Amino acid sequence: MVIELFQVDKIYNRGEPGEVLALQDINLKIEERSMVCLRGPSGSGKTTILSVIGCVFPPTSGSATIMGKKISRLPDHFLCRYRQSLIGFIFQNFNLLPELSVLENVTLPLYPMGVSPHERKRQAEPLLNRFGITHRRDFPVASISGGELQRVAICRALINNPPILLADEPTAHLDSRLAEQFMAMLVELKDEGKTIVLTSHDPRIYNYSGVDRVIDVVDGRLKSTVGEG
Ligand SMILES: Nc1ncnc2c1ncn2[C@@H]1O[C@H](COP(=O)(O)OP(=O)(O)OP(=O)(O)O)[C@@H](O)[C@H]1O
């Protein structure tokens, strides 16, 4: 298994006035080369599950094992290291920095790792080529089209060549053509060996043919699994 959560709970602001029990007893196993969609209403805990899988923070209790590495009890700097090598993130609305160029956006995850400008460019070039945005490399992201934006977001998630891609409500503001293109690119990446976890309450996503499992998240718990394999 690439991802294994066992009896995971997450409490935000523990012991403080704003305490929130966001996840309760999450048990989840995700196989390599699969695409899984977490589906549920706003506030149900989907992003929190992605954050635990994505080594953003450890669970409050329970265990999380990602690519065979138990990340649930790690100090922050180890968690960060695993996040950098194992995870590519595609954020809601893509979260790109509009004033920065396509190249700068794609290579952002390499900055904290101290990678030189030359090396950043070298790593980005094959991705920009593959996704057909080389001609936009030095353009500010604010000036490119919606289709190009999503390809920049995918390139940024791939820049560290991570085995796992996480996408939080990726198609929330995309028209149907772009949503379809986005999913087709993810399926291609799955077929190349990536494991992909998405959150969405968009039927265009959870009904998409390349999605292997849909898991319902309700009030911080996993409800049911469709097509569990
Ligand atoms: N940093 C935080 N501090 C305190 N509470 C939080 C924090 N992040 C999320 N929560 C709470 O945890 C619960 C789960 O939130 P989460 O963002 O995981 O849900 P979600 O299903 O992803 O929702 P959405 O679809 O709106 O993003 C909610 O009650 C939310 O208000």
Image (cartoon, rainbow, N blue to C red):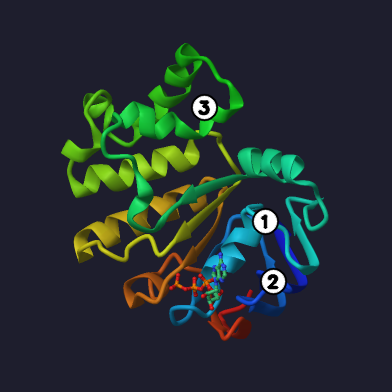
Quarter where residue 129 is shown: top left
Name the N-terminal-most of marks 3 and 2: 2
Viewer-closest of 181 and 104: 104
Q: What element carries label 2?
A: strand
Residue 129 at least partly seen? no
Residue pictured at 52% horizontal, 80% vertical: 44
Measured from the top left, where is residue 79 in percent x and y? 72, 46
Name the N-terminal-most of marks 2 and 1: 2
Q: Which residue lies furthest to the top in this view?
A: 118
Mark sitting on residue 10: 2
Mark sitting on residue 90: none
Q: Is mark 3 on a helix, strand or loop?
A: helix
Type of residue at label 2?
Lys
The reply to whether callout 3 and callout 1 are in contact (CB within 8 Å) is no
Indicate yes or no: mark 2 CB to ligand 1 under 8 Å. Answer: yes
Q: Is mark 1 on a helix, strand or loop?
A: loop
Measured from the top left, where is residue 211 in percent x and y? 47, 68
Type of residue at label 3?
Tyr
CA separation, marks 3 and 1? Answer: 21 Å
Viewer-closest of 7 and 11: 11
Mark sitting on residue 57: 1
Q: Is residue 82 left or right of residue 150?
A: right
CA separation, marks 2 and 1? Answer: 10 Å
The reply to whether callout 2 and callout 1 are in contact (CB within 8 Å) is yes
Q: Is residue 216 above or below residue 51?
A: below
Indicate yes or no: mark 1 CB to ligand 1 under 8 Å. Answer: no
Type of residue at label 1?
Phe
Residue pictured at 33% horizontal, 40% vertical: 97
Measured from the top left, where is residue 103 in percent x and y? 35, 27
Name the N-terminal-most of marks 3 and 1: 1
Q: Mark 3 points at which residue?
A: 111
